[in-house]
Amino acid sequence: MTITVSTITPVYCGEKYLVELLDKVDDIRQEWASSSSPLHLVEAILVDDGSIDNSAKVLKALSKKYPWVTIVTMSRNFGQHSATVAGICHSSSDWVVTLDEDLQHQPQDIDILFQAQAEHQADVVYAAPIGAAHGNSWRDRSSHWVKKVLARMSATPQVRMFNSFRLIRGPIARAAASSSSSQTYLDVAISWFTNCAVIAPVELIDDRYIKDKQSGYSFIRLANHARKLMVSSSFDIASKVMLIGLIAIFFSAFLGIAAIVMKIVTPGSIQIVGWVSLISVISLLSGVIILLLCIILEYVGILVTNQLGKPTFFTIDRSNDGLLRDWYLMRDE
Amino acid sequence: MNLSVHELDLSTDRAVVVVGLGFIGACIEGHLRAYQRQGVDVKYFPVDWETAKALGDKILSLCDSNSYTTIDIIWSAGKGGFSSGNAQMKQEFDYFSEFLLTISQVRGTKLIINFLSSAGGLYEGSGYVRSIDQLTLCRPYAKWKHKQEKILQNSSIPSRIYRISTVYGPSNNDNRRGLINTLIRGAKTGETVTISANQNTLRDYVFNTDVARQILRSIIESVPYSVQLLASGRSVSIDMLKNIVARATLKDVRLSYNSNSENDRDITFNRSLVAFFAPPTSLEEGIPLSTKFFDLN
């Protein structure tokens, strides 16, 4: 019984790294084949995302050298997530591994991801960097805080795990990728299909950023990335704010009743005529407006969620997981 | 069943006969018109499934009454499907055998058979197909199709065999619509489509125009006699198809699933096995084209 694996790599300016990357992917492919592993790396899909250097030429040469390399060429630069989505939509394996072009993610660490999967029977395994991947920069810190805040605000605690070096069960990857729209954050889409995600500590060092200060991401791009993450994650703000509206309505009712009672029982106690009524009416109208806006927001939220591609249900077959677990147990013995 | 005879506008006297103008045959026949000799009409003849000798004699009479140096016969005939039993498929096999026997008597004209076989049937349940010989032959349909291939290869008539994956595309044929056209129709009419498979089952879908062009190019360029796998090299799940169709039609596709473990097995082809000269049409392009055709007809 074979468990097939595909790797997906979006390529933008990777001409310096691609040869070494594919050589290392070939190493792990050979290692699995020679160790009688049930894992079989059947394809490496490289997505040319409108590359700005000689990556296209390098990719063509690599596809001739390695018959299991497939090149998908985008019509223009769409961005890393879109390129990853395109790559996943061209995959056909039991498991999909996404990794970056610049060797920040070492192909030999794919085995670590699989070990974590075997141990926890997870559907998704995210690499968790040991230390700061970008050299303790503002980028690492801001990424950490954005994810922390979003994990709290949204119903998706998986947000904190998100990383572009990931192992995803094939059907879930393809379902998430194919249902995503251009504004959907891929990992949020994955979380719609499974909450069975774990992390695997892996050494991740972005040499390209640390040494050359080069990155495919400018500040604006990163901000746009965070915006997409926020938009895709569902926040339960409407129902919380609706509570404020209800409180305002009850407060106005309470004020109104209190004013009437005071007028009857102690008529002289109200000094400023009309003040209580005014506050009561303002409170009532504000509460009603907030309530109506929240109801509208709920409907808009449902429409946006549907547009983003959230499914009603999804079925999966995990019956082959035992095979991988048994193999790793046997290997460790 | 019908057959059409096309006289090609090429340097030598050549004709192409399409036997069976069903979903794929009709598409091939449509593309052949681009190569039709000026002033010569396409001839159509009805043939039945009772007497293969009559069909064979028809071909022989074409050879005798015209000065064709070569006649390429595109065999896209077949009544059977995946659920066909042994009896029906044997009848089809016997018909084909008798036809081959009849036309083997030809003199003077070179006959070449371009046989349309089924990759979906022959490789069903293979999972990831690494080699063109990795056949499974699970069903009677597949076994008898393979027998037809074998008898053809063992005959004296040169042949090209095209193992075609699941075909989709614009079609007026309501009888054998295929999954994708059924999904498009379901989206447009609001009907719920019942799928006898798992939503994650992977299949390779190939556009009918790509198939037609490949076969015609193989004929016109006299490609060596061989077995060609005509698949896109990119498998998709039913769930993915549903999403692509929904985007193309701007409507929801309502699906219900009738679990059938026989249909749950993936079929994925290694891209290096695919024989297309030109990159196949992507689903993102082919499905909107099919949708447009549906809207116009």
Image (cartoon, helix red, strand yellow):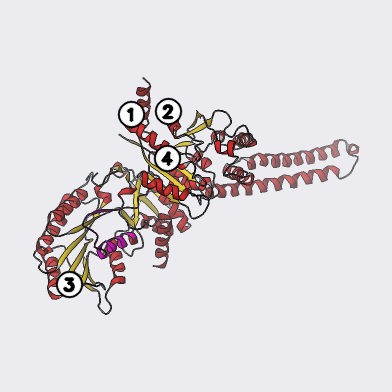
Q: Residue A66 at what x, y percent from top left?
A: 36, 43
For label 1, the residue is: A35
For label 2, the residue is: A115
Dot 3: chain letter: B
For label 3, the residue is: B68
How far apart marks 3 and 4 lie (CA) works out to 53 Å
Image position of A61 (left or right of A144): left
Kindly identify the amino acid type of the residue bearing the numbered disc 2. Answer: Gln
- Kindly state the secondary structure of the residue where label 3 is placed: loop
Dot 1 alpha-carbon crowd within 10 angstroms: few under 14, some 14 to 19, many 20 or more: few
Report the span colored magenta.
B210-236
* Mark 3 or 4, closer to the camera: 4
Task: Name the foreground residue: A298 vs A216.
Answer: A216
Dot 2: chain letter: A
Using the image, determine if residue B18 lies above or below residue B166. Answer: below
Image position of A324 (left or right of A303): left
Task: Name the foreground residue: A14 vs B132.
Answer: A14
Tag 3 near tag 1, CB within 8 Å: no
Using the image, determine if residue B282 lies above or below residue A270. Answer: below
Tag 2 and tag 1 share a subunit: yes
